[in-house]
């Protein structure tokens, strides 16, 4: 039996087939299991079907009842539970569904459609995926217009420390700093986070949670990676609050990601003079921005009002 194109939106895992085949060889087909069929093709159960063939077991089938919109939601729903989808997994599913034509975008060509034929709105898709509407809008924007090139600092040096007075403002908003994911021993003299990751730890590969302070590294394309990681951890609910300090490079993709995700922003009146490992301050060529993620934007606005213009991205 062939696989439905909707089934192919998700990655195939050979190791799962091997594990299931081994179980079926020993125990046969579990009566409560079934393979879902839609339009004469396998909609869900690709791994089970191949495992049954490998084990020489006869599978059980059940027809899916519903239109194509419901079928897309079904495929996502059953796999989200079994695969424990992350934000990155949900984004990949959205892009695959969009690019394959299953989640057609609403535009002037579809405005005359009615009822079940009308393409889903961003909010409809967000409800299916279990994310915020603005997250779907950002994914759509990135799909149509890939992120702009990343701008780095002129020095290319990642070891610059934020002056204590700005850390104190951040701590005043969040109460404590649970994690600094891009730091070092010397930088923690000011930050004093409960936990921090150094360059050797590779914060991009670590689990982030709680209240985060982040002054990301700028060189070698790391800025965009750290920003993407932060946004994903916030959307997943692992990071409950965060304050991010960057240059105000509004022409970059990473700045747009922060702007789209933040609850409030402070564009500094002047330039922050960072501290180097040898104690010498830097003289940046541009201003800076503090981005706040979390449920207390009003508290952030009061705390940072004296150092810059406060805005709400929404």
Image (spheres, grey):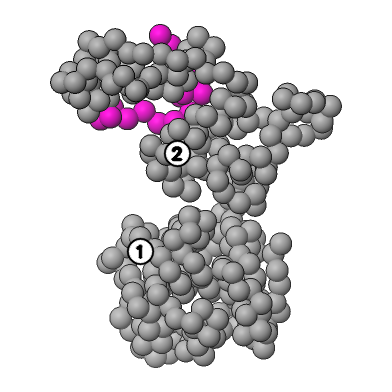
Residue 207: x and y, percent?
A: 35, 60
Q: Residue at x 60, y 27 (%)?
A: 70
The stretch of residues the image draws in magenta is 1-16
Above-or-below relation of 145 to 65: below
Q: Residue at x 34, y 17 (%)?
A: 49
N-terminal of the pair, mark 1 or mark 2, is: 2
Q: Nearer the viewer, residue 35 or 72?
A: 35
Q: Which class describes the residues within 10 Å of circle 2: few (<14), some (14-19), or many (20+)?
A: some
Q: Secondary structure at mark 2?
A: helix
Q: State which quadrant residue 150 falls in.
A: bottom right
Q: Nearer the viewer, residue 187 or 156?
A: 187
Q: Is residue 181 left or right of residue 99?
A: left
Q: Residue at x 33, y 57 (%)?
A: 205
Q: Which mark is residue 203?
A: 1
Note whether residue 84 is visible: yes
Residue 234: x and y, percent?
A: 50, 60
| Residue pointed to by mark 2 | 80
Above-or-below relation of 297 to 232: below
Residue 164: x and y, percent?
A: 47, 89
Residue 213: x and y, percent?
A: 46, 74
Q: Nearer the viewer, residue 164 or 302?
A: 302
């Amino acid at each position: 039996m062939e696989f439905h194109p909707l089934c192919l939106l998700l990655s195939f895992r050979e190791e799962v087939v091997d594990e299931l085949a081994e179980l079926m060889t020993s125990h046969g087909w579990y009566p409560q299991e079934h393979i879902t069929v839609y339009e004469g093709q396998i909609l869900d159960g690709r791994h089970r079907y191949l495992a049954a063939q490998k084990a020489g077991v006869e599978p059980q089938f059940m027809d899916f009842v519903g239109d194509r919109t419901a079928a897309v939601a079904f495929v996502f729903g059953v796999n989200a539970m079994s695969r424990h989808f992350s934000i990155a997994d949900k984004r990949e599913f959205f892009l695959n569904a969009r690019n394959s034509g299953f989640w057609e975008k609403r535009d002037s060509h579809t405005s005359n459609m009615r009822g079940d034929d009308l393409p889903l709105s961003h909010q409809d898709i967000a409800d299916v995926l279990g994310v915020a509407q603005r997250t779907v809008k950002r994914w759509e924007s990135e799909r149509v217009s890939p992120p702009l090139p990343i701008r780095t600092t002129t020095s290319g040096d990642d070891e610059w420390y934020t002056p204590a007075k700005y850390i104190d403002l951040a701590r005043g908003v969040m109460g404590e700093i649970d994690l600094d994911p891009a730091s070092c021993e010397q930088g923690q003299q000011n930050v004093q986070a409960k936990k921090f990751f150094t360059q050797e730890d590779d914060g991009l590969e670590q689990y982030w949670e709680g209240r985060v302070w982040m002054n990301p590294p700028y060189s070698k394309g790391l800025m965009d990676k750290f920003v993407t990681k932060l946004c994903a951890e916030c959307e997943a609910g692992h990071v409950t609050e965060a304050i991010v300090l960057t240059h105000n490079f509004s022409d970059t993709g990473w700045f747009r990601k922060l702007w789209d995700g933040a609850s409030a922003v402070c564009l500094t009146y002047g330039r922050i003079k960072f501290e180097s490992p040898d104690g010498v301050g830097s003289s940046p060529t541009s201003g800076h921005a503090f981005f706040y993620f979390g449920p207390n934007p009003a508290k952030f606005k009061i705390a940072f009002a004296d150092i810059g213009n406060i805005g709400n991205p929404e």
